[in-house]
Image: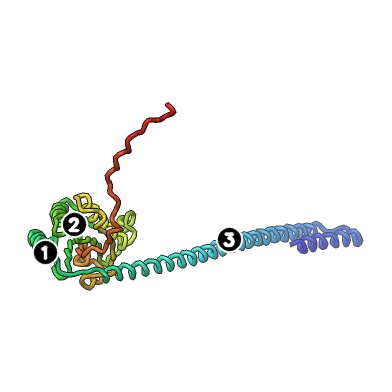
Amino acid sequence: MRHGRRWVRSVLALALMGGALGGCVSQAEYDRLVEANRSLTNRNQELQASLDDCQSMSGDMTSRQLAADEAVRSLRDENERLRGLVGITDASLRDLESQLRSLQLGALDPETDRALRELAAANPDLIQYDPSRGMLRFASDLTFDSGSDAVKSEAKSSLARLADILKARAAAAYEVHVVGHTDSQPISSRTAERHPTNMHLSCHRAISVRRELVGMGVPAQKVNASGWGEFRPAVPNTASGNTPANRRVEIYLTRSTASASAAPAPTTTPAAPERQPDPTK
């Protein structure tokens, strides 16, 4: 651009010098040179504006590239974090599976067995009883609203009857294992606010059932809660994942594995020792 301006000045200078040496420059020639200078000046300004635009675009593209690089790094970090969580979840599932395999599942004593059969018979839509495994299966769609871990009032009466059975002398030797299950239908965005995954929902529902039983008088140290999410379907899931038979809470009664040394400390407050006189007073 600077070379163009210098060239125009040189042309004018030569023209003027020519006029000085050879006589006056004609008005037409002078006007032509002025117009040429004006055109070159305008063209120079246009090229400078184009150069400025190109430099601005180059800076914008550089900024976008830096942002893209940062996004890629963030995605890689998140991917590594999720891989770690998957590893932890897999290990937890294997541990839970090992624990369940070690449970002493089997036939219960006649009194408890009869009571559980009667409970299931009185609630055929809600409860299934498997005497060979000492297991009650509660249908989740009748126990909870969709996407919720709050036990319905209709199911609480059945849980109250179960609590009475578990508090009876015949059931004193049993531990109670509450296990939640879901189907493979993806969690909705609204449900995800409280239960981010099916694993969360199954665990939270199991915890709610445990809370109900403990609140009804079943000793807390005898009841645990866990969840399998969608990973232990009772029947194959449908293509959409919406499979009601797989949405359930199972309650297993097993022989106690707790040792006497593991018994919880008494919850009553010990009597305060008799206050002795203070000799300094």
Q: Amino acid at mark 2?
A: Thr
Could you say whether the residue bearing mark 2 is in a helix, strand or loop? helix
Q: Residue at x 61, y 63 (%)?
A: 58
- Residue 158 in percent (x, y) is at 14, 55
Residue at the spot of label 1: 113
Which element carries disc 1, helix, strand or loop? helix
Q: Quarter-wise, where is residue 52 in the image?
A: bottom right
**Among the two numbered marks 1 and 3 on one chain, the one whose residue lies closer to the N terminus:** 3
> Looking at the figure, which quarter contains the N terminus?
bottom right
Instruction: Name the spot of residue 121 as percent of width and height, x first.
Output: 8, 62
Q: Residues within 10 Å of mark 3 (few under 14, many from 20)?
A: few
Mark on residue 63?
A: 3
Q: Which residue corresponds to the image point at 55% horizontal and 65% vertical from the top-left? A: 69
The answer to which of marks 2 and 3 sits earlier in the sequence is 3
Residue 133, placed above or below residue 216: below
The residue at which mark 2 appears reads as: 143
Of mark 2 and mark 1, the one earlier in the sequence is: 1
The residue lying toward the viewer, choosing from 45 and 176, is 176
Q: CA distance from mark 2 to mark 3?
A: 55 Å
**Can residue 11 be seen?**
yes
Please name whichever residue, 274 or 127, is drawn nearer the observer in this view of the structure: 274
Mark 3: which amino acid?
Ser
Which is more toward the observer, 42 or 15?
Answer: 42
Using a 10 Å C-alpha cutoff, classify the residue at mark 1 as few (fewer than 14 neighbours), some (14 to 19) or many (20 or more): many
In space, the residues marked 2 and 1 are separated at their CA atoms by: 22 Å
Q: Amino acid at mark 1?
A: Asp
Task: Give above or below for 17 relative to 87.
Answer: above
